[in-house]
Each structure stands twice: as C-alpha cells, then as structure tokens.
Image (spheres, rainbow, N blue to C red):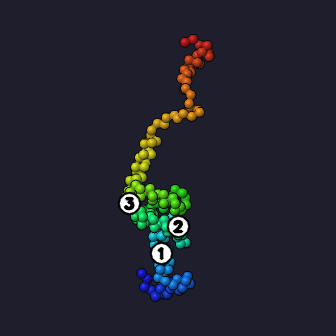
Amino acid sequence: DHRSIRYIETVAMAWKEEGITTVEMAKDSTSRYSKEYFSVLKAMGITNRNPADTEIALINTWTKEYGFTMDLIQEACSRTVLQTGQPSFPYADKILQSWSKKKIRTLEDVRLQDAQHQKRKLEKADKPKSATPNRFNNFHQRDYDFAEYEKKLLNKPN
C-alpha cells in the first residue's frame, strides 16, 4: 500500500538482488514482513531480526487455527517472558493451546480464568495437610504424659 515511487524503486532493486522474478516469489518474500509477526516478536522482547520459519508457523497457527486476536497472543507472550525470563515460542504455544481448549477468546476470559485459578489455589492451601505415610511417620505415634514422667524421674509422689 505504498505509493512513493522511491519506495517502490527500492523494493524492486532489493527483489532483483534477491533474485525474485515472479509474483509468487514476491508474495513469499513479503509474507515474512507481516505486522502481526513483528508485533509478536516485540511482545517477546525480540528486536532487530526477522521471524524464523518455525516462529511464523506458530504465529499462523495461533491466528488462523486457534483464531486468537493479536492482543490475546501478546498477553500470552508477555506471560511467557515474565514466567521464563526469556522469549520462548513453545512456552507461549502451550499457554495458547490451553486457552484454546478452555474456549478463552478475550482478555476478560483470561482474567476470569486467572481469578478461578487463584480461588482454587487458595482453597487448596486452606485444606489441612494430612500426614502421608513415609519412613518418618509410618509408625504408631506415642502419646506420652511428660508431666507424669517428670514426677517419676524426680521421685515426686502424685
């Protein structure tokens, strides 16, 4: 959608240098420069490089197969970086797969899911933990009356 003759001339010269001679080759070449790809890379904290083929494939899966909007994808990317401390497309893909299975379609759905998760987490923390049998507590617990033993040891009558 550029109308500047200088821009068109620059693109044409770049295509000549890359050996692009057909419309199909040109479309394939320009598909790497989609705004969606770069907004996902930016959300992951990646700058100054083009997306790799595997990254493009994942982004296409997220947008076309799962049908997610860019704001939802960017939220998953932000959560990925916050959780792992680095960009990870497979980690973001796991988040988005989970959201797809749970039919999450908006940021509001994500907020509701987070609230439900926190509620379950708090309920689980409030439950008393029962002692699980292991080598430290799998024997019959004794119930000594230490006051009684103290009296016996000190030879005090009851």
Query: Label 3's element?
Result: loop
**Cα separation between marks 3 and 2:** 24 Å
Q: Which mark is residue 31?
A: 1
Tell me what residue is drawn at x 49 percent, y 70 percent.
38
Image position, residue 16 (x, y; %): 54, 85
Tell me what residue is drawn at x 50 percent, y 74 percent.
32
Please tell me how crowded label 2 is: few (under 14), some (14-19), or many (20+) other residues with Cα within 10 Å: few
Q: In the rendered image, which residue does mark 2 sit on?
A: 54
Please tell me how crowded label 1 is: few (under 14), some (14-19), or many (20+) other residues with Cα within 10 Å: few
Q: Nearer the viewer, residue 149 or 117?
A: 117
Q: In the rendered image, which residue does mark 3 sit on?
A: 105
Tell me what residue is drawn at x 60 percent, y 15 percent.
152
Query: Label 2's element?
Result: helix
Image position, residue 153 (x, y; %): 62, 16
Amino acid type of the residue tagged 2 in the rendering: Thr
Q: Is residue 63 visible?
A: yes
Query: Label 1's element?
Result: helix
**Cα separation between marks 1 and 3:** 26 Å
**Cα separation between marks 1 and 2:** 14 Å
Tell me what residue is drawn at x 55 percent, y 61 percent.
86
Image position, residue 41 (x, y; %): 50, 67
Q: Is residue 9 above or below residue 81?
A: below
Q: Is residue 42 visible?
A: no
